[in-house]
Image: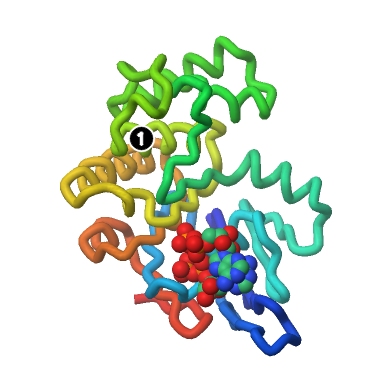
Amino acid sequence: SEALALEGIEKTYNPGRANALTVLSGASFELAAGEVVALVAPSGAGKSTLLHIAGLLDSSDAGSVRIGGVDYTGLSDARRTAARREEVGFIYQFHHLLPEFSAVENVILPQLANAVPGAEARAHAMALMERVGVAGRANNRPAALSGGEQQRVAFCRALANKPRVLLADEPTGNLDPGTSDTVFSALMELVRETGLSALIATHNPALAARMDRTLRLEAGVLVSD
Ligand code: ADP
Ligand code: ADP
């Protein structure tokens, strides 16, 4: 079945102005349940824009976004925000963990926002952190962790609410090549074990080759390899 589908997505920044920039002009694709797809495009091609639209963070000028078969086009901001919280996990190049909370608290917090009881949220957070090898760092603040450990914690946070779809924008792009490789492997194991559907933007062909297939963003449309 289908986890995520984009149909005819169009997006122009500054429409009608001299600096208007059309980034997406009819982008379409389907992500099947359990599928892991690489999104490859040159810098500035619109990867972040596409991921933000797919994750209901941004709206498009035309086209539709379906998550789990539900079409969110034109639904209220409240419905879109609720869906984003329940259905989508985001990972960025930089971890964006909250600096004043411990690693495990960063993984617990999104669950509390979804009304998961505290003890259950903590147990689930610890189980996720165990799987990617950062359980021993649970009570440290992010600043005390290495870059690779910070990203692993960010993966756990993104998966904490058991999203249907994971959207990742260069998830290991700020790590040195050796670290990037092992941290990416940890992410892939976690994604495969949980049967998550994922769209992962990367510049790294070796990482793209480890996914099920590659989508290229070219001149505003998505082309399957
Ligand atoms: P990528 O992630 O592939 O680098 P982005 O989606 O971030 O690409 O940006 C695509 C293009 O749109 C870039 O030229 C960028 O400068 C421009 N852009 C992104 N966001 C905005 C915005 N809010 N307003 C105007 N232009 C934007
Ligand atoms: P990334 O490299 O992670 O895609 P960017 O530096 O391209 O991030 O963009 C960071 C933020 O700034 C995004 O929210 C994007 O929408 C916005 N942005 C990018 N380019 C522009 C632009 N030319 N004008 C206004 N906002 C922009």
Q: Is residue 50 visible?
A: no
* Residue that protrudes farthest toward the right in the picture: 76
Q: Residue at x 60, y 13 (%)?
A: 118
Residue 85: image x %, image y %? 65, 40
| Left or right: residue 36 compared with residue 96 | left
Is residue 148 shown above or below 43?
above
Badge 1 marks a residue whose secondary structure is: helix
User: Along the line of sight, which residue is nearer the eye, 83 or 193?
Assistant: 83
Image location of residue 17, percent across then percent down? 73, 86
Residue 23 vertical placement versus 98 (above, below): below
Q: Which quadrant of the frame does ligand 2 lie within?
A: bottom right
**Residue closest to the eye, 69 or 148:** 148
Q: x and y percent of residue 19 in the render?
A: 65, 85
Give the quarter of the image for residue 185. Answer: top left
Q: Is mark 1 within 8 Å of ligand 2?
A: no
Q: Which residue does the numbered mark 1 point to in the structure image?
A: 152
Q: How is the image coloured?
A: rainbow
- Frontmost residue, 181 versus 26: 181
Q: Amino acid at mark 1?
A: Arg
- Residue 101 visible (yes or no): yes
